[in-house]
């Protein structure tokens, strides 16, 4: 359930909140500030829990409904935390025709989670994505910022085993 | 002053970066230092060469030797043999076409021979992070001439009109006319905006990313010219956050242009002010639609608005706004430097210039190609693309992403231009060109695009939100083997309704993948519905794996690979597959060494 209130309790630190307030102060009053502020907030906290959305709404003096509307509209924003290692399997056209679907099910089987979910130990979260633009290497999977290309399903297990 | 004798060009586009080009660069720099050659040879980080399938690519000038599939371990040999001793490392050279033998220059290969590079002219040639290199290839000369000679804005617009350039984002609206409308529009407070659509969301398309990564200044210069022409002083580039390298290079380029006085106030001391800001998209396909993109820059949900009023009249923050996409801008400075007539001489009667395509899917040379308009699909697939690999047959090409359609093999001689593609039910689109072979099921492909649309529909209008979901439901039903004859008619009818009633361009074109596959591959749909058979063997519910008892040696390899234990049989006796347990993953077929497993 990607876009519901997070079940994980909020654990923001005063330092993180201070950094967010600085970003809000920089952007306040500028036209179109909501997206850049939410993007910065997600970088600071890793996700956008309700508490952070309230801070943004109050800081920019805009309705919380508007902040939530934007946060829940765009795929990049997540209202739930992500794993230590974020896996995204590309399901873009080029990857799809080269067998990305079986790649994804290999990851699902290995980790026992579906796209949008996180492993109970918080280590891996899984998402499918639409084209990372490395179509020449199709099919492609990303783990954090590492790109793995020209993959076959049997390579998935050994690759994931490298992430401790 | 250093005398640079050799230039080592290393591709740092996303494709090659993913295959370790940063490590290769570091190794080159280390090796050059070790051999005392660091003053004589220079490593240049360039944008995409286009031939992504062979990456990482390293080209050494002045010889023009192109090395492909370079690994970190190859660097020592290239430096000690080529750079130090002047002997080209033949082993690593790009193997051109088989009958030609190894060729040294990329320009001679089939891949590049048919191309004409205008939008990509500097990609893979200059260092995108150096404004001096851009200026060295006549960069900012067009802007300088226009501003210092005080060429009237109308004359600038007339030049764009005369070139015949049309929007490269997909719809193909004449660019000069768009500039004219924005120029003519009256703003209540005199404020107008110039925007660049760099929200390249079509799956399988990466043309704009390569331009931004390889030649960001060309977009900045063109936007400044556009600002001068329409009377805007502020520009926005809306770029996908999923393109981190492109974002970083744009930030660097904007910073450099500001330092050189090529952005900001009083550019070229002409009294003209223009500033640029980056806005990052947040992963919404619909934001590629112009009104949605502007809503997103305003900080709102990226939902489209009804047109008219068009953005040229009432766009960003309700002011007249000019919006072009990256590739369109990348053509602008070339037109001013080489003449509108020279641009208009390329291409067909109604489609001028070139078009960049991201060639992907079942094709030997995946990568980026730029071809004159009117080039046939056959040239792109067979000559430039090197044909379909593994001896398979070309079945169809898909252009235009989720808004486009499939071109069947029978129409492979269609010239690629706006009108010809439209006439056969596809569209130019932004430039994704996906090649499919006989193993691809066209119903499944239509389903794939529909899934994408259902995911990405913004939800504002019901034809798109509900209609596409119903379309997908029908396709799922057909793929699962439950299709009924009347479903095909229902599909067609629903497609027409959505086309006519959806609010924005994305919704109106959403049924195209279904309509075009229905038109050209109706027999496949019918096989699914009437015979409960998937001819390409893709739709899982309609296929079954069986073991040929004559060919099976009973090696047990398949049984061990089966994730559900569906394969039974004693050692050295023919095995059988228990159909009720089989999940049709195909693992057994991949494992069999005797070709004994068949898919039906």
Image (spheres, grey):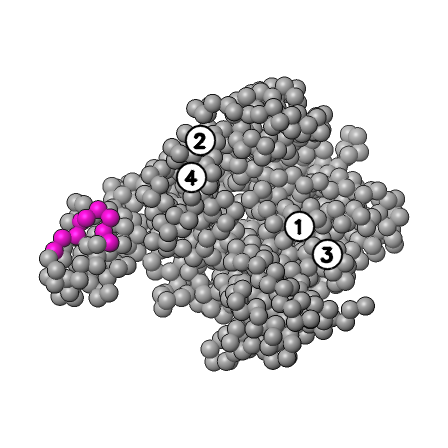
Left or right of B365, for residue B61: right
Disc 1 vs disc 3: Cβ atoms closer than 8 Å? no
Callout 3: helix, strand or loop?
A: loop
Q: Main secondary structure of the magenta part?
A: loop
- Which stretch did the figure color magenta? B561-569
Label 3: which residue? B130
Viewer-side residue, B189 vs B195: B195
Disc 1 vs disc 4: Cβ atoms closer than 8 Å? no
CA separation in Å, label 1 and label 3: 10 Å
Left or right of B561, for residue B307: right
Callout 2: helix, strand or loop?
A: loop
The quadrant in which residue B300 appears is top right
- Mark 1 is surrounded, within 10 Å at the Cα level, by few (under 14), some (14 to 19) or many (20 or more) other residues, namely many
Label 3: chain letter: B
Query: Measuring 55% from the left and 44% from the top, which residue is drawn there?
Result: B242
Do the dots labelled 4 and 3 sit on one chain?
A: no
Residue B474 on image: x %, y %: 33, 39
Label 4: chain letter: A
Q: Which mark is residue B249?
A: 1
Residue B9 on image: x %, y %: 64, 65
- Mark 2 is surrounded, within 10 Å at the Cα level, by few (under 14), some (14 to 19) or many (20 or more) other residues, namely some
Do the dots labelled 1 and 2 sit on one chain?
A: no
Left or right of B333, for residue B411: left
Label 1: chain letter: B
Label 4: which residue? A124
Q: Is residue A100 visible?
A: no
Disc 2 vs disc 3: Cβ atoms closer than 8 Å? no
Residue A41 on image: x %, y %: 59, 30
CA separation in Å, label 4 and label 3: 39 Å
């Amino acid at each position: 359930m990607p876009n519901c209130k997070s079940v994980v309790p909020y654990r923001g630190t005063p330092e993180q909140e201070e950094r967010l307030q600085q970003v809000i102060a920089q952007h306040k009053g500028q036209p179109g500030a909501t997206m850049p502020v939410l993007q910065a907030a997600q970088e600071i906290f890793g996700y956008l829990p309700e508490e952070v959305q309230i801070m943004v709404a109050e800081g920019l003096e805009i309705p919380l409904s508007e902040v939530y509307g934007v946060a829940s509209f765009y795929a990049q924003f997540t209202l739930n935390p992500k794993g230590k290692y974020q896996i995204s399997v590309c399901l873009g056209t080029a990857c799809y025709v080269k067998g990305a679907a079986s790649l994804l099910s290999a990851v699902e089987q290995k980790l026992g989670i579906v796209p949008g979910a996180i492993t109970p130990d918080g280590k891996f979260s899984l998402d499918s994505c639409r084209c990372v633009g490395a179509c020449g290497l199709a099919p492609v999977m990303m783990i954090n910022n590492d790109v793995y290309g020209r993959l076959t399903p049997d390579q998935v297990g050994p690759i994931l085993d490298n992430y401790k | 002053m250093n005398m640079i004798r050799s230039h080592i060009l290393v591709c740092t586009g996303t494709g090659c970066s993913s295959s370790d080009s940063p490590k290769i660069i570091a190794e080159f720099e280390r090796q050059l230092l070790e051999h005392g050659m660091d003053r004589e040879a220079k490593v240049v980080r360039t944008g995409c060469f286009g031939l992504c399938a062979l990456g990482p690519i390293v080209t050494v000038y002045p010889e023009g030797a192109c090395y492909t599939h370079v690994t970190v371990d190859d660097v020592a040999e290239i430096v000690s043999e080529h750079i130090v001793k002047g002997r080209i490392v033949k082993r690593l050279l790009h193997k051109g076409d088989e009958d030609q033998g190894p060729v040294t220059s990329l320009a001679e290969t089939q891949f590049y021979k048919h191309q004409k590079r205008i939008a990509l002219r500097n990609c893979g040639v200059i260092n995108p992070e150096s404004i001096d290199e851009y200026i060295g290839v006549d960069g900012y000369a067009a802007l300088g001439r226009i501003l210092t000679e005080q060429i009237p804005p109308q004359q600038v617009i007339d030049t764009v009109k005369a070139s015949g350039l049309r929007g490269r984002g997909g719809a193909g609206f004449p660019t000069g006319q768009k500039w004219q409308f924005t120029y003519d529009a009256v703003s209540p407070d005199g404020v107008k905006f110039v925007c660049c659509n760099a929200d390249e969301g079509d799956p399988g398309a990466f043309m704009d990313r390569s331009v931004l990564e390889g030649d960001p200044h060309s977009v900045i210069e063109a936007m400044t010219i556009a600002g001068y022409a329409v009377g805007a002083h502020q520009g926005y580039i809306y770029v996908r956050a999923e393109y981190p390298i492109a974002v970083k290079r744009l930030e660097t380029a904007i910073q450099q242009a500001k330092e050189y006085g090529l952005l900001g106030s009083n550019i070229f001391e002409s009294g003209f002010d223009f500033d640029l800001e980056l806005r990052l998209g947040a992963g919404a396909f619909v934001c590629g639609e112009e009104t949605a993109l502007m809503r997103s820059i305003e900080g709102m949900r990226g939902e489209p608005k009804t047109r008219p009023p068009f953005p040229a009249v009432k766009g960003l923050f309700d002011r007249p706004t000019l919006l072009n996409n990256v590739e369109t801008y990348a053509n602008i400075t070339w037109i001013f430097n080489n003449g509108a007539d020279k641009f208009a001489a390329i291409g067909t009667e109604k489609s001028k210039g070139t078009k960049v395509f991201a060639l992907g899917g079942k094709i030997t040379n995946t990568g980026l190609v730029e071809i004159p308009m009117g080039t046939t699909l056959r040239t792109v697939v067979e000559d430039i693309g090197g044909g379909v690999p593994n001896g398979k047959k070309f079945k169809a090409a898909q252009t235009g992403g989720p808004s486009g359609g499939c071109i069947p093999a029978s129409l492979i001689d269609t010239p690629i231009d706006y009108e010809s593609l439209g006439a056969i039910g596809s569209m130019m689109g932004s430039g994704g060109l996906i090649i499919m072979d006989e193993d691809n099921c066209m119903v499944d492909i239509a389903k794939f695009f529909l899934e994408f649309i259902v995911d990405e529909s913004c939800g504002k209008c019901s034809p798109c939100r509900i209609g596409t979901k119903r379309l997908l439901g029908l396709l799922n039903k057909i793929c699962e083997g439950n299709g009924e004859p009347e479903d095909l008619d229902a599909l067609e009818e629903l497609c027409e309704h959505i086309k006519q009633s959806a609010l924005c361009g994305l919704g109106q074109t959403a049924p195209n993948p279904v309509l075009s596959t229905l038109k050209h591959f109706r027999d496949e749909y019918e096989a699914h519905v009437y015979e409960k058979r998937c001819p390409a063997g893709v739709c899982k519910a309609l296929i079954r794996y069986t073991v040929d008892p004559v060919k099976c040696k009973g090696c047990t390899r398949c049984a061990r690979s089966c994730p559900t234990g569906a394969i039974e049989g004693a050692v050295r006796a023919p095995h059988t597959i228990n159909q009720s347990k089989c999940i049709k993953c195909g693992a057994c077929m991949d494992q069999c060494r005797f070709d004994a497993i068949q898919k039906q």
